[in-house]
Image: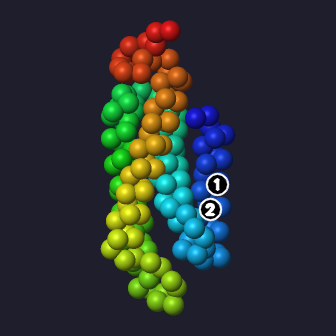
C-alpha cells in the first residue's frame, strides 16, 4: 500500500479507537468493537510492511504469501493479546469504566486480531511483491507477466 494509505489507515485507526474510548461506544454500537479489533491489527501489519520497505526492502517476513500470512497472524495475536492485557489493567485501575474482559470476549477479540493481522499481511504481501517486481511465490524470482 502506498505511504498515504498507511497514513490514512493509522488516522482511521486512531479516530475509530479514540471515538470508542471517548464516547464509550465499543459495546453499545453493534459490530463497533469487532471492527476495531480487526482494523487495528490490519493497521499494525501495514505499518510493519511500510517499515520493511522504508528500511531496505528485501524482507524475510513477507517473502511468500504463506510466510506473510504467518507473520500477520503472529503480529495480530501478539498485538491482540497485549491489548487484552492492557484492558485488564485498565479495568483494575479504573473500576468505574465498563471494560468487558470476560473470557469469551477476550478470546473472540484475540481471534479477530489474528484475522485482522492475516488480512493485513495478505494485502501487504501483494503490495510488496508489486513494489519489488517479484514473483508471488518466490521472492528470489522476478515477476513474470
Q: Residue furthest bottom?
A: 96
Residue 51's place in the image compared with 41, above or below, is above
Residue plotted at (37% across, 77% down): 102
> Whole-percent x and y of residue 73?
36, 47
Q: Position of residue 105 (x, y in %)?
A: 39, 70
Few, some or many residues within 10 Å of mark 1 (<14, 14–19, 20+): some
Which disc is residue 41 wearing? none
Q: Is residue 25 visible?
A: yes
Q: Secondary structure at mark 1?
A: helix
In the picture, residue 103 is in which quadrant? bottom left
Total residue callouts:
2
Q: Is residue 13 above or below residue 25?
A: above
Examine the rendered structure and indicate whether residue 83 appears above or below residue 39.
below
Quadrant where the N terminus sits is top right
In the image, 93 versus 64, the foreground residue is 64
Can the viewer see residue 52? no
Foreground residue among 94 and 116: 116
x 53%, y 66%: residue: 33
Other residues around mark 2 within 10 Å, as few (<14) / some (14–19) / many (≥20) = some
Residue at label 1? 12
What label does residue 16 carry, if any?
Answer: 2
- Marks 1/2 in contact by CB < 8 Å: the verdict is yes
Q: Residue at x 36, y 21 (%)?
A: 137
Amino acid at each position: 500500500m502506498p505511504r498515504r494509505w498507511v497514513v490514512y489507515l493509522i488516522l482511521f485507526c486512531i479516530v475509530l479507537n479514540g471515538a470508542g474510548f471517548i464516547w464509550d461506544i465499543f459495546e453499545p454500537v453493534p459490530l463497533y468493537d469487532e471492527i476495531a479489533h480487526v482494523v487495528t491489527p490490519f493497521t499494525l501489519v501495514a505499518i510493519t510492511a511500510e517499515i520493511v520497505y522504508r528500511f531496505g526492502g528485501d524482507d524475510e517476513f513477507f517473502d511468500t504469501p504463506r510466510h506473510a500470512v504467518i507473520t500477520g497472524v503472529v503480529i495480530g495475536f501478539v498485538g491482540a493479546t497485549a491489548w487484552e492485557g492492557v484492558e485488564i489493567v485498565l479495568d483494575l485501575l479504573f473500576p468505574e469504566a465498563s471494560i468487558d474482559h470476560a473470557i469469551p470476549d477476550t478470546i473472540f477479540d484475540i481471534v479477530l486480531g489474528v484475522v485482522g493481522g492475516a488480512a493485513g499481511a495478505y494485502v501487504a504481501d501483494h503490495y510488496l511483491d508489486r513494489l519489488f517486481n517479484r514473483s508471488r511465490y518466490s521472492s528470489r524470482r522476478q515477476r513474470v507477466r
